[in-house]
Image (cartoon, grey):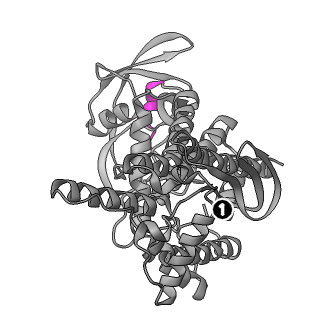
């Protein structure tokens, strides 16, 4: 049941994200006087619709996107000099211009999108992606400020009774021949909170861990809080071979795949992991970090698609960095909800964080400068504005609107390519899913 609920939450939030994305386009367009004839969530056959004012609102059968129809997206033939249609590409552009012109009601040519100034076109086109970014910021704020992040703390979850080798299996237990762990020998107990170590006030597990690892075999004073009281202890660390960790707290491996170790101070204590609420300043930092990671993925998207195709052709497992589609996102949500040993707060925070990352992906992906994505329309508007500015500086007549219908063949090609990649992702997520 939890699996199904998590999947439904993802579907609902995804549809809301799509709907708000389109509202981000529709609202400024209407405020600038453009007639918006359709506001649709999904593609394909219409399941439900209702006309309010001059706009038809509806839901379609395939919930993989949405659109708003802005009347007069392409300038008519007369506005761009009646270019001849000598090739099939020219005929596609001409057909697009004529279809766009037919949507303009008599006497309402001034309400066509192509009449907008460059700044207004940018506001309309960027409104959708920016709305996804706002959603991501809100979801990330809920996670970081409301739930917090799982963080290791100086509140101790366990105390080792003996010193075991770094490569000892998790099932290995202490024997009478093993040396006693320093923490247990000093009287530290599970549930204690380390308040100070060697005279230094402890504020985090990372700080305490660093102090312990840098000590030698010398007795140091330790203060712990136990049942609301401070207890003074003296502990003598030992120097033991322990794994080296990188900046992401992952063990560093050598060429053979074995953990790299180094001699460090060792006590034999295990931190607890708690949900710690973060500072409001952490929200923009987290959004910026996720956005940058998403940009790197989008920048390498062609190679990732090639890797995906190869994994399907060769029937090899996909690694954790493989791109996923809506099916994979839904499966991840279900697995998060049904994972044992994790409290509901961490599950909820993980699910919301994934949805925030999804909206950041929509923000970044839609800014790719190719039609029919929003970034393609942004580039067309910037090109039109640049031409007009150059003409103004040179004292030339103001040029007419940019013939954006010339980009229609490219838009069709990109649409077909994205559709093929989307179908490939659905297939791969079903038959060869990424394992987490």
> Is 222 one of the magenta-colored residues?
no
> In this rendering, is residue 429 above or below 86?
above
| Dot 1 alpha-carbon crowd within 10 angstroms: few under 14, some 14 to 19, many 20 or more | some
Residue at point 68%, 54% (across, down):
38
Q: Which residues are magenta?
A: 179-187
Q: Horizontal and vertical percent for residue 68?
A: 62, 54
**Apparent side of residue 436 relative to residue 396 in the rendered image (left or right):** right
Image quadrant where residue 347 sits: top right
Image quadrant where residue 298 sits: bottom left
Residue at point 29%, 49% (across, down):
263
Q: Nearer the viewer, residue 408 or 59?
A: 408
Name the residue furthest left.
394
In the rendered image, which residue does mark 1 sit on?
A: 326
> In this rendering, is residue 66 above or below 419?
above
> In this rendering, is residue 359 above or below 86?
above
> In this rendering, is residue 354 above or below 276?
below
Residue at point 52%, 77% (across, down):
94
For the C terminus, give its image quadrant. Answer: bottom right
Task: Label 1: state its secondary structure.
Answer: helix
């Amino acid at each position: 049941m939890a699996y199904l609920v998590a999947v439904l939450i993802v579907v609902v939030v995804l549809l809301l994200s799509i709907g708000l994305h389109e509202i981000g386009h529709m609202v400024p367009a209407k405020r600038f006087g453009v007639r918006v004839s359709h506001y649709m969530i999904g593609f394909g056959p219409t399941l439900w619709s209702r006309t309010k004012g001059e706009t038809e609102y509806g839901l379609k059968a395939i919930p993989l996107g949405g659109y708003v129809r802005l009347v007069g997206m392409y300038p008519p033939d007369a506005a761009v000099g009646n270019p001849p249609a000598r090739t099939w590409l020219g005929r596609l552009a001409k057909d697009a211009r004529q279809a766009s012109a037919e949507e303009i009601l008599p006497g309402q040519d001034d309400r066509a999108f192509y009449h907008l100034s460059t700044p207004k076109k940018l506001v309309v086109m960027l409104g959708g992606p920016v709305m996804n970014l706002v959603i991501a910021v809100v979801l990330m704020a809920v996670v970081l400020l409301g739930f917090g992040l799982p963080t290791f703390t100086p509140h101790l979850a366990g105390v080792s009774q003996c010193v075991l080798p770094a490569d000892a299996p998790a099932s290995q237990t202490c024997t009478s021949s093993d040396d006693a762990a320093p923490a247990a020998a000093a009287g530290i107990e599970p549930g204690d909170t380390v308040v100070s170590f060697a005279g230094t006030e402890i504020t985090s597990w990372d700080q305490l861990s660093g102090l312990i690892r840098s000590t030698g075999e010398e007795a140091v004073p330790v203060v712990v809080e136990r049942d609301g009281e401070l207890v003074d202890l003296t502990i003598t660390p030992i120097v033991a071979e322990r794994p080296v960790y990188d900046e992401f707290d992952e063990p560093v491996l050598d060429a053979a795949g074995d953990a790299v170790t180094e001699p460090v101070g060792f006590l034999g204590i295990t931190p607890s992991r708690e949900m710690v609420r973060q500072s409001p300043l952490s929200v923009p930092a987290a959004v910026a970090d996720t956005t940058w990671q998403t940009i790197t993925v989008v920048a390498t998207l062609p190679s990732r698609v090639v890797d995906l195709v190869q994994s399907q052709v060769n029937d090899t497992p996909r690694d954790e960095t493989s791109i996923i589609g809506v099916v994979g996102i839904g499966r991840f949500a279900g697995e998060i909800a049904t994972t044992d040993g994790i409290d509901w707060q961490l599950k909820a925070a993980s699910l919301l964080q994934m949805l925030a990352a999804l909206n950041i992906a929509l923000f970044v992906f839609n800014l790719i400068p190719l039609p029919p994505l929003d970034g393609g329309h942004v580039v067309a508007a910037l090109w039109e504005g640049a031409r007009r500015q150059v003409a103004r500086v040179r004292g030339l007549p103001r040029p007419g609107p940019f013939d954006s219908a010339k980009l229609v063949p490219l838009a069709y090609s990109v649409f077909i390519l994205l559709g093929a990649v989307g179908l490939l992702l659905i297939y791969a997520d079903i038959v060869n899913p990424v394992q987490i």
